Amino acid sequence: MSNGLDPAKQRRMAMTAAVCVAVFVGMIGLAFAAPPLYRAFCRVTGYGGQTQVATAAPAQVSSRQVEVRFDANVAPGLPLAFEPVQRAETLHLGQSGLAFFRVRNLSSQPVTTVATFNVVPHKTGQYFQKLECFCFQDQTLAPGETREMPVVYFVDSALEADPNTEEVRSITLSYTFFRSVDDAADAAERAAANGS
């Protein structure tokens, strides 16, 4: 029994259905792959203010100077005082800089935190290189403990050759402390124990 469609039309409809299914499956795959691909893209290009990690300071230092400003933030509900020890530092492109950030646990409990960072303007992220940093490492602070943490960095002299950054005279390095995943679970357990 025939359905009334010629074989060529049936093949086109089958091909269209197969393409639609392939596109749907591909979109689902891209949805899962997007976050790690985006992070890798930001790490390589400096997009979104993602800074780079260097293993050594450059041998060449430019005559052009840039001011690096320091900013410190704490996620809501986290019992920390966090601030840069100095507000800014002016250095030559390619010259290593050293900045300290001070953090203090304001609570009567140990707190485990982790810091993230970015730079503004975002287009300078690919040129901002860190040699030493306290970011992305769990920091456990005892009750009332104060700690000074160093950041060793430089701004690559390649920034000078980029026409998109010729107006840049200052860069802000910003850190934000968040409660670590493990500490959040511990805090929830303590709250549950105190509530019972």
Image: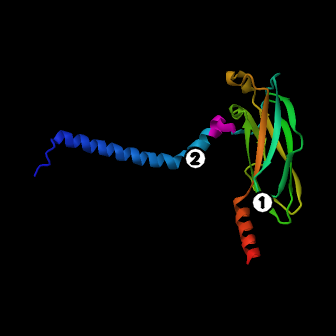
* Position of residue 89 in the picture relative to residue 35 (left or right): right
In the picture, the quarter occupied by the C terminus is bottom right
Residue 70 at x, y percent in the picture: 82, 39
Q: Is residue 139 magenta?
A: no
Q: Amino acid at mark 1?
A: Thr
- Relative vertical location of residue 190 with respect to residue 55 in this rendering, above or below: below
Residue 112's tag is 1
Rendered location of residue 56, percent (x, y):
77, 37
Q: How many marks?
A: 2
Residue 187 occupies quadrant: bottom right
User: Compared with residue 44, is residue 81 higher up or lower down, i.e. above or below?
Assistant: below
Residues packed near mark 2 inside 10 Å, few (<14), some (14 to 19) or many (20 plus): few
Q: Earlier in the sequence, mark 2 or mark 1?
A: 2
Query: Magenta segment: does it hold 43?
Result: yes
Look at the numbered discs 2 and 1 and tell me whether their residues touch, using CB distance below 8 Å: no
Magenta-drawn segment: 42-49
Residue 105: x percent and y percent? 85, 58
- In the picture shown, does residue 172 fall above or below 14? above
* 8 to the left or right of 193: left
Q: Residues within 10 Å of mark 1 (few under 14, many from 20)?
A: many
Q: Main secondary structure of the magenta part?
A: helix
On residue 136, the disc is none
Residue type beneath disc 2? Pro
Is 70 positioned to the left or the right of 163 in the image? Answer: right
* Residue 36: mark in rendering: 2
Residue 142, x across and y down, in percent: 85, 62
Q: Is residue 8 left or right of residue 136?
A: left
Q: Secondary structure at mark 2?
A: helix
The residue located at (63%, 39%) in the rendering is: 42
